[in-house]
Amino acid sequence: MLKIDSVEKGLVIDHIQAGKAMEIYKYLNLDKLDCSVAIIKNVKSKKLGKKDIIKVENNINMDLTVLGFIDPNITINVIDNDTIIDKIKLELPYEVINVVKCKNPRCITSIEQEIQHKFKLTDKEKKTYRCVYCDTAYE
């Protein structure tokens, strides 16, 4: 039996769609942290069937818009003294900046390197984001 210790102080990123933990690990730059980070993949879940979990043994500042963009069903448990002191539920962010890049070769962001890549949520049901400059949909 695999045993992962509980987090005394830190974050537990839970309800990650199975197989997405490494993507989140990279987006959040967790490899640059000087603390314990546990990635648990394919955990049995009543709600999802299978899920991934990331445990971070430290409180870190993180961009919640990135997590909401990747998967709005993720929950974040903030833990102190082995107790959950806050539970953060995510939702699709209205706007994401410099998270993904526009694929349109004619977009101003392809020509002007210093311009931020901005996408706005245009269809919440379909989770569609469009570039604010050229209206290209992010797939």
Image (cartoon, grey):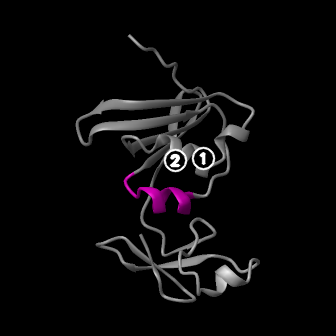
Magenta region, residue range: 64-73
* Figure check: 10 above or below 93: above
Dominant secondary structure of the magenta stretch?
helix
> Relative to residue 85, is residue 113 depicted above or below?
below
Residue for point 57% across, 43% down: 25
**Quadrant housing residue 1:** top left
Looking at the rendered structure, the secondary structure element under dot 1 is helix
Label 1 is placed on what type of residue? Lys
Residue 8 in the image: x percent, y percent?
59, 26
Between 6 and 54, the residue placed more toward the observer is 54
Residue 19: x %, y % from top left: 40, 41
Q: Is residue 26 left or right of residue 115?
A: left
Q: Quadrant of residue 122?
A: bottom left
Residue hosting label 1 = 26
> Badge 2 is on which residue?
23
Is residue 12 one of those drawn in magenta?
no
